[in-house]
Amino acid sequence: DEEEKRLDELDKLILVLASKTNSSKEKIAGCEKVCELAAASSSKTIETFRRCGGFSALNSLLKSSDETLVDAAASALGNLSSTSTRKPTLRSFTCGDHVIRCRELEFSASGTAFNAWTAGLVLATWIAKSEKFAGWAKGARILEIGSGLGTCGLLAGKLGGNVTLSDFVPAVLKNLQLSAEENEVEARVVWLDWALEAGLQAADTSNTHWYGGEVDGAEVGAFDRLEEDESFDLIVGSDVCYETDHPELVSAVLSKRLAPGGWAVVLNAVRFPEVHERFLQKIGEFCSLVETEAVDSEEGDLAVNIVQEGCTQHSGYYAGGMQLILAQRSSDPPAKS
């Protein structure tokens, strides 16, 4: 029976992934094999793999210092949790007095934007309950970076903000347009490349790469982009700082796009505390006020339900927990170099 063979292979892969003696190269190959098997396996087989510790073994690899291994494990988890085990779904999330409806996608088409991550739901809950944010949002120019499903940006639009949603992958941008219509939010959707914002990449998008493959330049061209001198009163983002180059990239976006006196509201799952600290240091170079607060996703006012068991995690799972960052840009415009 083919299904039994796949289950046997997956069972053996758990030992490969969990072994402390196997190299990163061997574990990366194991993750790639999991992706291959997941596409052909039944939901029953995937559930058995989860119960036998397969998801736990992959989750442990997300803490690795090897970025390639982390990406491979995340890809495997995404494939296990995508259309092989469930169809893309229109989900409803209750945030305070508001309900946000978001369309999920296949992992292969959207990468990490296929699902609502815990940090995004926690930030959306904070936005819905914060009188401070409500005061900032009404009539404000608001940019959401790394929008993914757009939960936080769509909610900001419901609170009266003039919202711009941004992401890098064309399939995600198309999905954001549909979700804006579904939520009856007037939102502009733009293609935004953090490397371009940081001046690290040429403006030619004909051969733009992301870890899911090459981005089609023609598809990118179908979407608006920010004007070179465009700025915002509020910038929001959730789980946008987890790779080693993210502190420089995300801070470059904030430095370029946050108006004098404007606020950045970021909530990150802190996988690597040193990355988080470097991000705080970078934004402190142009923000006159930077406040941080540890948040709990399981208990208290910001508690949320996990969306996809085995793929998304609560705050206690991460080395540095989850941290809410409120940063205000200095009132004086940046000096021209």
Image: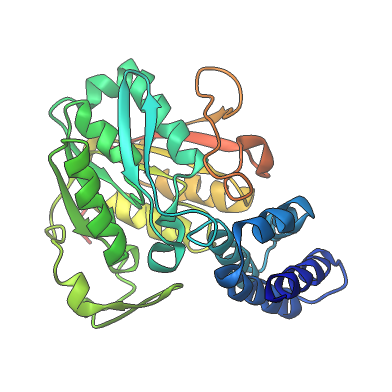
Residue 176, how many percent across, how many down?
25, 51
Residue 46, how many percent across, how many down?
65, 59
Residue 89, how many percent across, how many down?
39, 47
Residue drawn at (16%, 35%) of the image: 184
Residue 326, how many percent across, how many down?
40, 32
Left or right of 269, for residue 248: left
Residue drawn at (13%, 61%) of the image: 224
Point out the residue furthest to the front here. Answer: 1
Left or right of 212, for residue 61: right
Point out the residue furthest to the right here. Answer: 21
Q: Quadrant of the N terminus?
A: bottom right
Image quadrant assignment for residue 209: bottom left
Residue drawn at (38%, 57%) of the image: 105
Can you say whether 130 is above or below 196 in the image? above
- Residue 162 visible to an observer of this rendering: yes
- Residue 333 visible to an observer of this rendering: no
Image quadrant assignment for residue 100: top left
Residue drawn at (74%, 75%) of the image: 5
The colour scheme applied to this rendered structure is rainbow
Q: Quadrant of the C terminus?
A: bottom left
Image quadrant assignment for residue 128: top left
Point out the residue furthest to the bottom here. Answer: 207
Q: Nearer the viewer, residue 96 or 37?
A: 37
Can you say whether 73 is above or below 330 in the image? below
Can you say whether 38 is above or below 182 in the image? below
